[in-house]
Image (spheres, grey):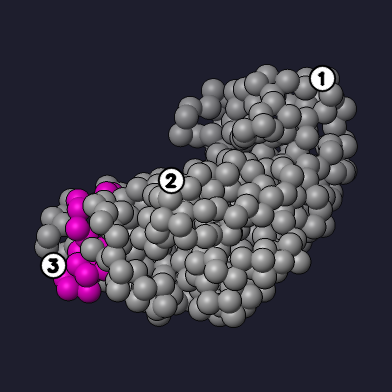
Amino acid sequence: MNSFRILKMSTHSNFSTFQKLIMLPGPTNVPIEVTQAMVAPSIGHRTADFSSLMKEMIRKGKILFECEEDIIHLSASGTAAVEASITNILRKDDKAIVTVCGEFGGRVSEQIASVGATPIELVADYGDFPSLSDFERALEKNPDAKAVYIVTNETSSGAMCHWLKEAGDLTSKHGAFLVADAVSNWGADKMPLEDYNIDFIATGSQKACAAPPGLAMIALSKRYKEQMMKDPQKLHFLNLPRFIKMSDKVKQTPFTPCLPVYFALNKAYDIMVEEGMENRYVRHQVCGKAFYDAFEAMGLQLFGVPESRSNTVISIAYPEGIDDKEFRGSLAKNYGVVVAGGFGEMMGKIFRVGSLGMINSFYVLTTISSIANNLNRLGFKANTDAAINAALKNLSKL
């Protein structure tokens, strides 16, 4: 497996914003060559230079998403891509099944309702994910559902869909569209669009791609594209048929693109293609398992149902007496490691470690040792040696 690029940490005790290890579920650490790509001389977005850039990004994107249709790049966040998947296909009184087991699934449900469609919520507790059997029953009870929306990795809780391929097969048989809100795990977990019968994948540049925030990427099936083009909605910025028509014609975008992030993502695509998607999937699985085993060996309680745990968002329950703000503030100030707190109803109850993008042995071991030392400073007896040994047992597979 190719070794992965890392940014060297400063030896100074006073970490600046740019020297911290960003172990968030996003944005993630960015390779130096991706950052440097942003300082390329500007080009006009109505020129042959931009058309060449966009053509290259589409070519690489089709390799990475494993699809035939051209990739759409929006100068927006992943949320815009998810909203586009709703506004371009759903109409008033349509039905859509949606997984809801955290903050982001709830947002998708609200977006579905906002266009006058009816969300059929498939609900699970925070830290868990709806089961495949529950999903199958929902399809059987709602044979007229036009679309299915699966938040493949619930970032707020660290719960993941482990039956995405089966969902694609079932959804396809029912004639519905399968939309994957894969913002926090595309590029880390396997989801080939065509092989999994997925119709729409929405993700963002700042997660497993290890590029800066600013671009949303959309991969479409031929079936979804044809339906959307045949019956276009009256939309402006999120009018995907408009993006497709202009891309087909001149390989440009309808609106001014975020050029620096285009340059950066193009370079990030190069790194992803070079490593190979199968190697990326293995690396993320190994590093995720290393984190879980290490935190358990450290004496911490893992959050969530084991069968539903994410490979990329590692959620840990706070020990009694450990304050969220103090823990994360001390970790960042004294060790230069930034992790996320709880989100929504889990705020103050858990902390979340992002294990995606550039993640490798260096990041895993640095984060584990820093968290253990920080907890010991705050009065919790963390077993540092056991944690490191548990992590190394997994990381030896890389």
Residue for point 50% across, 67% down: 146
Picture quadrant of residue 323: top right
The residue segment tinted magenta is 243-263
Q: Nearer the viewer, mark 3 or mark 2?
A: 2
Residue 152 locus on image (x, y percent): 60, 58
Check disc 1 and report the residue beneath it.
321
176 displayed left or right of 364: left
**Is any atom of residue 361 visible in this view?**
no
Check disc 2 and report the residue beneath it.
114
Q: Residues within 10 Å of mark 1 (few under 14, many from 20)?
A: few
The amino acid at mark 3 is Ala
**Is any atom of residue 213 visible in this view?**
yes
219 displayed left or right of 157: left
Residue 140 locus on image (x, y percent): 67, 70
Instruction: State yes or no: residue 257 in magenta.
Output: yes
Give the spatial CA distance, label 1 vs label 2: 41 Å
Q: Secondary structure at mark 3?
A: helix
Give the spatial CA distance, label 3 vs label 2: 39 Å
The one of 127 and 144 positioned closer to us in this rendering: 144
Residue for point 69% across, 26% down: 348
Q: Secondary structure at mark 2?
A: helix
Residue 48 circle label: 3
Give the spatial CA distance, label 3 vs label 1: 60 Å
